[in-house]
Amino acid sequence: MEKDQYVWNPNANQEFTVDTALSQPAATFNKNGGFNCTVGTSAKLSLTVTDDGTTTWGKQLIQDQNPPTKTTYFTITPQASLKMVSPGKLVIGEDTVQTRINVLGSKNLNVPNLQLFVHEVFFSNMEMAIAESNVEMLGDNFSYLNIGNASIDVQDNSTCQITPSFGEKKIDIVTNFLMQVQDISSAQLDGVSVQPGAKVLFNLLANGEPDYPTIRLSGIDFLGPEAKNYPKGMLNFQTYDGKNNRGTFVLAGIGNAYQYTAMRQLQLISIDGNTDPTFINSRLNTTNMYQNGNMILTLRFQK
C-alpha cells in the first residue's frame, strides 16, 4: 500500500487510512482530551518515540483548551493495527479525561491489532474494548504497568496479553480495575500486584454453550503479604443460566493445597457475585486442580 506522509496532531481528530510510520519525541505524540485517533480499515500505524519522555493519550489541558467533550477515542478498525515503541512512558487518560480504546477485529493479520512496547504504561482513566482482535503489551522494553482507573473487556474470540518482562516486571493495580473476558476469549496478566484499598474484579462471562473464557494470572500469592489486599470475590464466574460457566482461571505458580486453603479462607472466588463458602465449595471443581505448578479453577457443570 502506498504510504501517505501524515503528521501527528495532538489537537485534531485524525484518521490514518494508509500504512503510516512516524518517528518523533514522546510529547509530540500526545492526543489532547476530546480529540480522537482512528486507524482505518487495513491500515497499519507505527509510532516510534525517539526519547524517554512521556506521551499522554487523553491529556487534560489548562482552562478551556479542550473541546466540550473530554473523552478521547482511539479506534482500530477491522484489519487495522497500531504499534507504539517507546523507551519512556505512555499515560492513557487523566483525572478529568477518559480515554476509550476500541480494538475492533478481525484478526486476519500477521501482527496483533494493538501492540504497546513501552517502558512504563499508566492506565490512569481508560476503557478498552477488544473484539475479534489481539492486543499485546510485552517485549524486552516493557517493565511496568500502573492501573489507576481502568476496565478491559475481551470478547469475540480475542486475546489480550500483558507481560512486563524487563526491570520491575510488575502490574500495579492501585485504584479500580475490571477485566472481563467473554465467550472463547482469553487474557493473560503477569506480575500482578494489588495495592491496599484497590477495587479489583476479574470476571469470566459465559454467554452460553460452548463458551470457555480464560484468564491467566501470575504474581497472585494467597500466602504472601499482599493477600490482605485482595478484595473478596475478586475472581468471579458469571453464569449464563444461573448455574454454569465453563470458564477457567489459571493462577500461575501457586498450584498447591496450602494456597487453595488460603484462597478459600479469604473468600476470593465468587459465582454471580455470591461468595458464600458453602455454596462455592459445592460448585468448585476440585478434580485436577493442580497442573504443572498452577492452580486451575473451574466450576462443576450442572444440568
Image: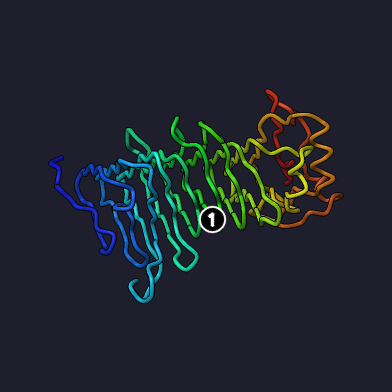
Q: Is residue 255 left or right of residue 173?
A: right
Residue at left offset 46%, top offset 36% = 142
Q: In the figure, 3 relative to 287: above or below?
A: below
Where residue 215 appears, as percent x and y from the top left, is: 60, 41
Q: Quadrant where the N terminus lies?
A: top left
Which residue does the image show at 30% across and 57% down from the upper left?
37
> Where residue 77 sits: x, y (%)?
32, 51
In terms of depth relative to the viewer, which is nearer, 288 or 11? Answer: 11
Identify whether 66 is placed above or below 223: below
Judge from the rendering whether residue 31 lies leftward or rightward of residue 43; answer left or right.
right
Quadrant of the rendered structure where residue 216 is?
top right
Image quadrant of residue 256?
top right
**Figure disc tally:** 1
**Looking at the image, residue 242 lies above or below residue 185:** below
Q: Position of residue 232 (x, y in %)?
A: 76, 53
Who's the residue at 84% across and 38% down the image?
A: 261
Above or below, 163 relative to 45? above
Residue density around tag 1, few if under 14, some if 14–19, many if 20 or more, within 10 Å: many
Give the farthest residue toward the right: 278
Image location of residue 83, percent across then percent down:
34, 42
The answer to whether 200 appears left or right of 62 in the picture is: right
| Residue position marked by numbered label 1 in the rendering | 151
Q: Is residue 63 left or right of residue 1?
A: right
